[in-house]
Amino acid sequence: MDAPAVAVTRDGMKFAAAWMDMRSGRNDRQIYWSAMNGLKDKPLAGDSKGVKGHPSLSFDNRGVLHVAWEDDRSGVQRIRYRTPEGKDIPLSPEKGKASFPSLACGKVVGVTFEFNNDAAFVAVTE
């Protein structure tokens, strides 16, 4: 286990945690997560190909959980985002390595990350 992330709602009634998990071997890092709604130790990404890492979590003001992470299923390490409907979408460009996402919720859902030795920001529209 490595790189844990946690999030809690403003009212303290919901809690979620995610982490890089190497239970299948060091070269098979996946992200697992758990939440107080009964979800226990489940893989986050819908595609098990590639290495996943460095999750970032945040609840919005409605109590909806948002998640971003590193994912190299396409052969290039990109930042992906899980929509509230459960779809995984890429946020970073196809060319260039993207790392270390940090997600926050306010009037928009924003994700910042390292990209080609610089910082990038993406506002996620729902």
Image (cartoon, rainbow, N blue to C red):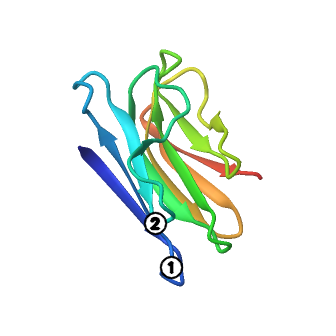
- The amino acid sitting under disc 1 is Met
Residue at x 47% of width, y 60% of height? 38
Residue at x 56%, y 32% (from the top left corner): 46
**Distance between the alpha carbons at the discs numbered 2 and 1:** 9 Å
- Above or below, 74 against 37 in this view is above
**Could you say where residue 23 lies in the image, as x and y percent from the top left?**
25, 33
- At 53% from the left and 75% from the top, the residue drawn is 9
Task: Report the side of 4 relative to 97 (left or right).
Answer: left
- Examine the rendering and report whether any part of residue 65 can be seen: yes
Tally of numbered tags: 2
Kind of residue at disc 2: Met
Q: Position of residue 3 (x, y in %)?
A: 29, 48
Badge 1 density bin: few <14, some 14–19, many ≥20, Cα 10 Å: few
Residue 89, by quadrant, is top right
Seen as rendered, the residue at the extreme bottom is 11
Q: Which residue is mark 2?
A: 36
On residue 13, the disc is: 1
User: Which residue is found at the position 62% from the left and 71% from the top?
Assistant: 63
Residue farthest to the right? 126
**Label 1 SS:** loop
Q: Is residue 37 above or below residue 110?
A: below
Q: Are marks 2 and 1 in contact (CB under 8 Å)?
A: yes
Q: Secondary structure at mark 2?
A: loop
